[in-house]
Amino acid sequence: MSSQQQTVDELIRSDYEHGFVTAIESDTVPPGLNESVIRTISAKKNEPEWMLTLRLQAYQHWLTMEHPDWAHVQHPPIDFQAVSYYSAPKRKEDGPQSLDEVDPQLLDAYNKLGIPLEEQKALAGVAVDAVFDSVSVATTFRKNLADVGVIFCSMSEAVQEYPELVQKYLGTVVPYKDNFFACLNAAVFTDGTFVYIPEGVRCPMELSTYFRINEANTGQFERTLIIAEAGSHVSYLEGCTAPMRDENQLHAAVVELIVMDDAKIKYSTVQNWYPGDAEGRGGIYNFVTKRGDCRGARSHISWTQVETGSAITWKYPSCILRGDDSVGEFYSVAVTRGMQQADTGTKMIHLGRNTRSTIVSKGISAGRGQNTYRGLVRMTPRAENARNHSQCDSLLIGDRCGAHTFPYIEVRNPTAKVEHEATTSKIGDDQLFYCRQRGLSEEDAVSMIVNGFCKEVFNELPMEFAVEAQKLLNLTLEGAVG
Amino acid sequence: MSTTVEAQRAWFEQAIDQAQGDLPGQDLEWLQQTRAHARRAIGTLPVPNRKSEEWRYTAIEGLLKNSFQTPAGEADAARVLEAGGWLEPDYPAYRVMIVNGRCIADASQTAGLPEGATVGSLRTALATDPELLGTWFGQAAAHTDHLFTALNTALINDGIFLHLEPGVVLDRPVEVVYLSLGQEQAPLTQPRNLVVLENGASATLVERFIGPGDALYFHNGVTELALRDGAVLKHYRVQDESRNAYHLSSLYLTQDRNSLYQGTTLAFGGAWARTDYQAVFKEEGARCELGGLYTVGDRQLTDFHLDVRHNVPDCSSREQFKGILYGKGRGVFDGRILVEKQAQHSDAHLSNDNLLLTENGEIDTKPQLEIYADDVKCSHGTTVGQIDPQQMFYLRSRGIDADAARRMLCLGFAGEVIDAIEVPELREYASQRLVATLNQSIQAAE
Amino acid sequence: MLSIKNLHVSIEDKAILKGLNLEIAAGEVHAVMGPNGSGKSTLSHVLAGREGYEITDGEVLFNGEDLLSLEPEQRARLGIFLGMQYPVELPGVNNMTFMRESLNAVRRGRGEAELDAVAFMKRVREKAKLVELDDRLLKRSVNAGFSGGEKKRNEILQMAMLEPQLAILDETDSGLDIDALRVISGGVNALRSPDRSIILITHYQRLLDYIQPDFVHVLVDGRIVRSGDKQLALELEKKGYGWIEEEAAA
Ligand SMILES: Nc1ncnc2c1ncn2[C@@H]1O[C@H](COP(=O)(O)OP(=O)(O)OP(=O)(O)O)[C@@H](O)[C@H]1O
Ligand SMILES: [Mg+2]
């Protein structure tokens, strides 16, 4: 009994690894949001007129919108005027032409995070775009990728170099009117990653973006756009961390995926933003809109996320299954402890015939964490023979946390089939006993059982990430009796 | 936008103003106060719209387009009985007839009740038993946060009052028939019921909701149910309203230690029909079983909202609801299980299964778990689909024609819910009613 | 090796074991039989340290040490192994990983070096062959979706890996086909040694044809009411428990 309590108490603690601050000179726009700030951002990025127009349109609309209140999270009102909307490490006039020109302090920061940007040191087969506060500071392996026609660069560069592609696709999956935070993002986004995979190309390496918030009082508003042309294939990973600070910081990103006939995008996230301290001071507000459009027949989007960080997570990576026979998947592990709150899940909108979706969500609540699964499965009248299967399981560790499941299921086609199952429980006493009878300590037993609970999701991650995710989970659960 | 809201609010105000004439118990302070609170709530509560989570899939615009009027006085008993046929199925029971919201003594039959049992008109009880009523009344019903419950409460008039003294066990079911008769002015009928089972008491309560042909009316009933220690209530409800009827039942159940509630609702009729169930465990060891079957045909909307609250440890609940959709209609299911922090060892399982027989139907289902305690076993499962083609094939390969096979499989699907009804005649009636509906659906499909 | 004296155990105020005595010396095999619900599994759980049981009286010494004050994993590391009547499923936990963690934890407890991956694999393969456990089961989650017999084989495999001092096998023979029974008995017999003891809980004389016990005990209503040699099991097979219960009651 008592030892169990102890395990629980220990679980609630355990430290955040990535809480350091990099001392680097930054070019930061003073806090506040108005038209002139947006013009400044646009000018700093030397954007074409159409981009500025889009931003201003979004801003005007945003002014008419209200902060959403439906999520199962609580936080004091956000003062959008107290946020700085642009912060970039100072650098030479034209930006680095090669990694040699990247500020060594930055390289060092990424090294510390375990993301070496020097290509010779990099993980084999992974190209990285490193986003530091508001801007992309380096993108590796661009040359190798360009050889097969893959475009992998920062969004800022894409606007300059591939304006016709950006103009054609940006905002077509998540229009600026979509929701409050997406609208804000459309007005003020500063950078992000752009990926274009031409027809028939299997991207030869994993692409990844590593997001880092460094500066205080800044928001990070990045925008990611990935286009997979017919028959192409790409696996994309993103990771994120931030220093420990007492104030909350806002991260409001938008991710858009577009997948044509027979193409596939696999999008994996390991989110480890600073979660705040045990009393709930500080931490990132992670309000993200992620959506993929399966435009082509037999197109395929697979979202996998491991969410361990952030004070508040609010995100629903979704799939619009437009093309016939298209497939959407969502695999999620969300851990909340301390005072963390997560309201996350997915939407699967079945428009095409024979579309299929799978949802596997594993929520783990510890400490005083609140963990909510919220999902929508919609079968429209045209979605003949569409299928969905959802499994949402929650694990509670300790008696002060909460686990909530709010699925919405809307079916308008009799040939569609939807199955949804959800369970909530604590770790089984019999499972714990079984492991301990075989000699495992209680701590190891808990960690083993929790890892098992998440296995289905980890299996979906690319190898290097699966290892990282498992480490992260163990770290999160670390400190049990020993 | 605000002008429609104002117009909608006026609809409620008017419904209340128009019915002030005939309210009983004007001399009872608690009653007057309760009515006044409700009345005030009507002026301030938001009018539900698509953005209200509880009304997301259930539009009330259609309802508010009609104007309804509370009928004055009692209906003519002779006319009611003459119209006949209301008593099917017949089985030994204590009967109370409620017509357009008012009890009709001449059409009721409660002779032979055991000592300690009261079954009858609320209006009468307000005169004879005001203190007992005062202690229970309005304890559970959310008349200050549910607009339609407020409407009912502001106009409390009549309904049934069922009270069992400790240990009283009823030998026969109590059957209450709510008959709504169309009139020139579409009636607003608002029975208000109170059911209290004291310690160890036990009863079976059957409620049937009916109305002729295509009569237009709005039944807005509110029932408060209190089960004290060890009490057992089996509660069967058959909603068979007219094709054009609007029907809303709001039930507020509270359970004390080791009590058992078994409720089954069958929803067949109505153009727009909704059942709101709130069940609250107040003491440990109680169990609540809610079951439901709904069929949804053309131009029908059928909605079930469950709100089961585990506030104390060691209680269990089961919610099992099944829907068969066979026309251009909409089924809505929203089932929430809440387990509060202190409610350790809660055990709750909810399931909602739906069969879509034809195109154009829509089902919106939303099972929810909201859990703040860790030592719990909670789960839900939901399915939506058509009849399994393999099962169809199996039956047909044994020589059964497609219609019969479909009927058989639907009956099998609904069987679990219907079988929970322990009154054989009622169970039989429910099966037949379902078969009739299925036949209708098969015809519709042709 | 194991000495149980006047053990009283209850669950939620209901007395299950009511003064149980049992002495087991190194190298002995003891069979425990008795009607359903008499308390056999309770005894095995209490010895292994499962929560939820209240020890109201008595003591249990394991090699002179007070067993009842130890955590389950400490007992496991001292060499107590419980093969469960209903082995638990661990979804998502790889069987091989689990066994390796378990073995190394127990080895550390014994002050032995951990086995490296190669040595471990070699040992698993060898032992798996001994209990004729399909290789594929090693790669699956622990017991998840295993058939009844597969679970029991998996238990015996773990026992063979851990080489316990005292193995308690709770109805390891239930639900086994004839071949499996032979295999599992083989596994148990292979483990028999002068410094290892075994408690066999079983309902069937059949098992005792394969594993010859030194002693047979009959547990009725929380007490050992009769002890004898393997003849006693034969007698029980013929006559049932009725006569013993009557005698015990008298
Ligand atoms: N968790 C529990 N709560 C209440 N009673 C229990 C619990 N566990 C066991 N019991 C009761 O204790 C008694 C002994 O159970 P036990 O499992 O030890 O019997 P057994 O001898 O192993 O029976 P079998 O031969 O059927 O395996 C039984 O009456 C059982 O119902
Ligand atoms: Mg047993």
Image (cartoon, coloured by chain):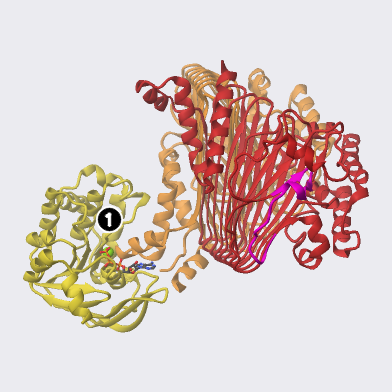
Question: Was residue B206 drawn as part of the magenta stretch in this picture?
Answer: no
Q: Quadrant of residue C236?
A: bottom left
Whether residue A123 is visible here, answered yes or no, is yes
For residue A450, above or below residue C219: above
Residue B307: where, in percent of width, then height?
65, 51
**A413 with respect to C206 (left or right):** right
Some atom of ligand 2 lies within 8 Å of the CB belonging to the residue at label 1: no
- Total numbered circles: 1
Foreground pick, A88 / A9 = A9
Residue A328: where, in percent of width, then height?
52, 30
Q: Quadrant of the C terminus of chain C?
A: bottom left
Q: Residues within 10 Å of mark 1 (few under 14, many from 20)?
A: many
**B264 with respect to A476 (left or right):** right
For residue B101, above or below residue C102: above
Q: Which residue is mark 1?
A: C99
Question: Was residue B100 drawn as part of the magenta stretch in this picture?
Answer: yes
Residue B333: where, in percent of width, then height?
62, 40
Q: Chain of mark 1?
A: C
Residue at left offset 79%, top offset 53%: B143
For residue C242, above or below residue A303: below
Whether residue A218 is visible here, answered yes or no, is no
Instruction: Specify the segment rendered in magenta.
Output: B96-118
Q: Colour of chain C?
A: yellow
**A154 with respect to A42 (left or right):** left
**A334 with respect to B107 (left or right):** left
Q: Amino acid at mark 1?
A: Met
Q: Quadrant of the N terminus of chain C?
A: bottom left
Q: Colour of chain B?
A: red
